[in-house]
Image: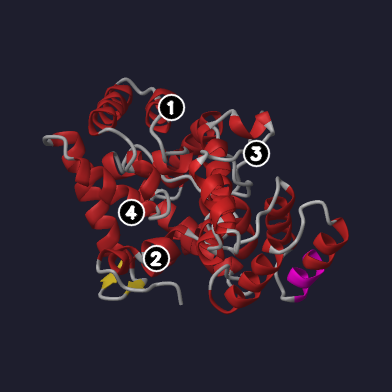
Amino acid sequence: MDYDFELQYDYNDIPALAARYLATPYKRWTAADEDRLAEEAGWRLVHAQFNLADVRAIVLWKSHRPLWLFDQNDAADVEAAIRDAIAATDVGDVRRAVNGLTRLTGVGLKMATAILTAMFPAIYTVCDFRASAALGQRDYSSPRYYVAYLAACHRMAADHGVTLRDFDRANWQWSKEHSKKSRRRCRGAHIPAMEAAIAHAMSLPSTDLSNATRLGHQVWRHEMTKSIALVLLTLMMSGPVLLAQDKATAEAAITSGPVTPCTFMAEMRDAEGKHECEKRDTARLFLIAGKPDAALRLLCATNESRAAFGDDKNGEASQVHAIRRGEDWSN
């Protein structure tokens, strides 16, 4: 498959867009501070003794959401993946560098590209839905796409006389500003409506199609997109929904092991699809346990939700230091 990469804005705007990105305030920090800390951690991974904390810092820079999955990895496995990525980079093997990192739990293609970018900012660039949108592409999650995307970014950055990092920053900032007017947030004012919809779902038999349809219309009336309505209904219809009041049954379901509503093998062929499936599995368990707020947070982290509401990596990165201090960032 050939990809037609085309910059969606005037290249003369690259410096100004990159500058606005770097100046984005994050409480007592800016995006420039966040980038600097991530790249310092990446430099240490390449040039100093391995420290798992440096990898965690980069994971948090990209997104705090998969951190609980990433922490399931053994430190020795993470170090081996990092060393293999360095070796692959030394011989110019982009696919090997990406594939080695995506074998880690909690690391999909997007996270792998963030780790590589922090380690080698002049060689790699972050690939996510915002960066792809700025080049006129949908959000693909395959090493094959990334190889083509990376080559296009190198070519365009060179043509326009900017660094690879500033090109990435400009693309992200353009996408954020371009989608701002139509963007709907998964958090904020819509949370009460979604929580009410989820609570309603908890009380519905999974086979009650008429009630499920009414719930979909209810979600729609609260100005949520079709994607989010479908996510909620998928959770309802993927298997038996237990009443939250039935504590014994809920506890038995949780201790029995993970449920698997994701049955489409195409989705499970790559690490990114598997991680998306795990999010929805875990969200469903939270629903079973009567914790719709926790389920909501996981639903907000799915690609479907992020694409529908326009959630972005800097919206997540801005919360990193608040999370470290134990502050509430949900509002």
Q: Position of residue 128 (x, y in %)?
A: 51, 48
In reply to whether residue 218 is colored magenta, the answer given is: yes
Residue position marked by numbered label 2 in the rendering: 21
Q: Please give the range of residues in magenta.
A: 216-221
Quarter of the image that includes the N terminus: top right
Q: CA distance from mark 1 to mark 2?
A: 29 Å
The kind of secondary structure element at disc 3 is loop
Q: CA distance from mark 2 to mark 3?
A: 37 Å
Q: Position of residue 152 (x, y in %)?
A: 51, 39
Report the side of 58 relative to 240 (left or right).
left
Rendered image: mark on residue 262: 3
Going from N to C along the chain, the mark reached first, 4 or 1, is 4
Mark 2 belongs to which amino acid?
A: Tyr
Q: CA distance from mark 4 to mark 2?
A: 18 Å
Mark 1 belongs to which amino acid?
A: Asn
**Residue 2 visible somewhere in the drawing:** no
Q: Position of residue 235 (x, y in %)?
A: 67, 52
Mark 4 belongs to which amino acid?
A: Leu
